[in-house]
Image (tube, rainbow, N blue to C red):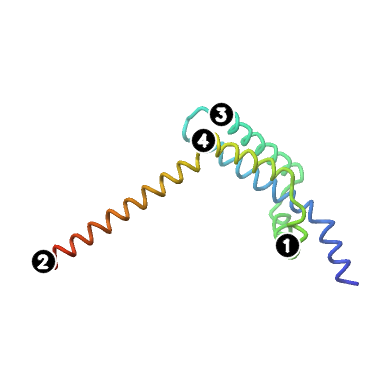
Amino acid sequence: MHRAIDKRLGRAQAPGVMHRRALRACAAIGLGETLAVNAQSIDKNATRRAIQFLGAEAAAELAAIPDTSRLRARDEAFAAAYPQACAAAPAAVAGRMLRLIERYRRECDFDRFERDCLFAQIAARAARFAAAAADAAAGDLS
């Protein structure tokens, strides 16, 4: 009986906890995006502005709660204690941010950029290995 009540309690509180956790993540992403754009002094495209706006909305909603370190600690403890209930209660704001990030990745072709960087790293390592092998072979001939 106690276990059933505990599970119901977890399911009842999970949406609020997950919403606050998603707001914190969105606010951090929005702030990071704002800082990156300001540091780079580049023109923002519409998706970057939407990410910043969603982050600002999340930060404002957190400020209205108010989000304290004590509440953050309680939310993290709850998520650790009720992982299944939390997994079953996705927050809509997190889904919106994820879709914006995916759209931005497609617009900027980050996947191609990451792939090109990976190939460059592999080529550099192969060149170092080949040079080390050539040096070793030259040492054997002496």
Q: Quadrant of the N terminus?
A: bottom right
Residue designated by label 3: 45
Q: Amino acid at mark 4?
A: Cys
Q: Earlier in the sequence, mark 3 or mark 1?
A: 3
Q: Position of residue 28 (x, y in %)?
A: 61, 45
Gap in Å between the C-alphas at discs 2 and 3? 59 Å
Which percent across, then down, holds residue 48?
58, 33
**Which residue in the protein does label 4 denote?**
108
Residue 103 figure quarter: top right
Measured in 3D between alpha carbons, the distance from the residue under mark 2 to the one under mark 4, in whole angstroms, is 51 Å
Residue corresponding to mark 1 = 83
Contact, CB < 8 Å: mark 2 with mark 4? no
Could you tell me if the residues under marks 2 and 3 are in contact, i.e. CB atoms within 8 Å?
no
Residue at the far left in the pictured view: 142
Find the residue positioned furthest to the right. 1
Q: Residue at x 17, y 64 (%)?
A: 137
Figure check: 44 above or below 87: above
Quote the CA–CA distance across marks 3 and 1. Answer: 37 Å
Nearer the viewer's eye, disc 2 or disc 3? 2
Question: Pointers 1 and 2 in contact (CB under 8 A)?
Answer: no
Q: Amino acid at mark 1?
A: Pro
Which residue was labeled with disc 2?
141
